[in-house]
Amino acid sequence: MRIGSFELKDRVFAAPMAGVTDRPFRRLCRRLGAAYAVSEMVASDPRVRASGKTSRRLDHDGEPAPVVVQLVGADPAVLADAARYNVDRGAQIIDLNMGCPARKVWPVTLKYRTGWDPADRNAVRIARMAESAGVQMLTLHGRTRACGFKGQAEYDTIARVKQAVRIPVVANGDVDSPQKARFVFETTGADAIMVGRAAQGRPWIFREIDQYLRTGSVHPAPTVLEVRGLLQEHLEEHYGFYGEALGVRTARKHIIWYTRRLRGGARFCERMNRLERCEEQHRALDEFLQDAGERDDRLQYEDGSIESLAALEREGDAGDCDTIAACEPC
Ligand SMILES: Cc1cc2nc3c(=O)[nH]c(=O)nc-3n(C[C@H](O)[C@H](O)[C@H](O)COP(=O)(O)O)c2cc1C
């Protein structure tokens, strides 16, 4: 699949998630099979560029190509300026949450929802407008803005958009297993799929989906030893990226996603929330996984299931992000 001059070899993408898909997590997802990983959204307003948060979002050190930065904003001239600013700092593709920069000298892609609400689904109209404005790829989350994260993703609307345009269409929403990924490809005819929440605490889902799509066989769960190594690397890069004080706080959610369904995970997560130093956090996780590894060779969730979006929703965790309304204006 091609976006501008970039040829992507696979069809499984990592979704942008503010507060989650930072550089360390994107790199991990790419290593584990995601063909493409979109940055957390970056505000286009130049006044916030000096903030620590925005400058971290401009840091693409060691990120494999294509480096994709998602911009949010409403003013075309400001967006165009922000796009140039990000391209100068390593962005190779600019993904927009609606709005279009005035002049396109880099591939511009668009991520949007199916409409304002179920009575006003405008996804096909927007897709045609975007295509004629020169947008090179569309990613469609199969819900309206009013639907938030409720209900099932509407794959039929994604299928209609795919029929309506010639540019690549990426289907997004509720993909949480290799089998679901295949179903979404078959139902929508999309060129690629994008996985968000199901990758939280399970970045190896990308290789699992990839293998299933290629061969029809199910990739075995990772060994606990492998997970231990991956988490060590993830945490080291995370602490280096955020520094001690912020690093220890922002690592907690990842550690909790990784461990809470393992045996003894709930108690471990309570303890994790009280640790204040990176080193303590790192050591505690390592010991917890060492114990898990002595019990089981492969990663095994307590209820015997794999992590699923249904389970996340039961815990009220899916879409638990106060930036979503701002980051998905369409
Ligand atoms: C915590 C969180 C943060 C998100 N941040 C963004 C964002 O910055 N930009 C964006 O376009 N979508 C954002 N989204 C939406 C996801 O990219 C994706 O469209 C949505 O989660 C549906 O996919 P999923 O069912 O695979 O999670 C966010 C979602 C979550 C759960």
Image (spheres, rainbow, N blue to C red):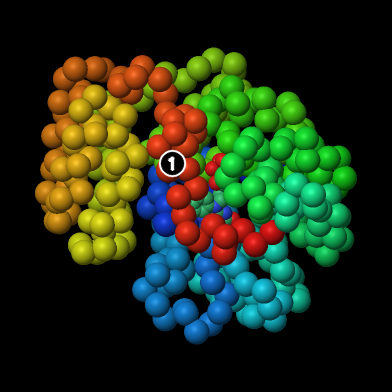
On the picture, is 188 further left or further right than 282?
Answer: right
Tell me where residue 156 appears, x and y as whole percent.
78, 35
The three-letter code of the residue at mark 1 reads: Gly
Q: Is residue 315 left or right of residue 160?
A: left
**Could you tell me which quadrant the N terminus lies in?**
top right
- Residue found 72% across the figure and 73% down from its top: 101
The residue at 72%/68% (across/down) is: 99
- Figure check: 266 above or below 164: above
Q: Nearer the viewer, residue 246 or 14?
A: 246
Residue at x 61%, y 29% (from the top left corner): 181
Q: Is residue 241 above or below residue 154?
A: below
> In the depicted view, which residue is nearer to us: 306 or 13?
306
Relative side of 321 to 108, left or right: left
Quadrant containing the C terminus is: bottom right
Measuring from the top left, give residue 95's x and y in whole percent: 64, 60
Q: Across the whole image, how many numbered discs are drawn on residues?
A: 1
Asked if residue 262 can be seen in this view, the reply is yes
Using the image, determine if residue 98 lies above or below residue 38: below
Q: Nearer the viewer, residue 141 or 231?
A: 141
Instruction: Please tell me how crowded label 1 is: few (under 14), some (14-19), or many (20+) other residues with Cα within 10 Å.
Output: few
The x, y position of residue 91, in whole percent, is 56, 65
Above or below, comparing residue 208 to residue 50 in the picture? above
Q: Of helix, strand and loop, which one carries label 1? A: loop
| Extreme residue toward the front, this view | 119
Q: Which residue lies at the image location 65% right of the left edge and 25% below the top edge? A: 182
Tell me the quarter of the picture where residue 78 sits.
bottom right
Is 91 left or right of 52, judged from the image as shown? right
Ligand 1 within 8 Å of disc 1? The answer is no
Does the image show residue 123? no
* Image location of residue 119, percent across then percent down: 79, 49
Determine the image quadrant of residue 116: bottom right
Residue annotated with mark 1: 316
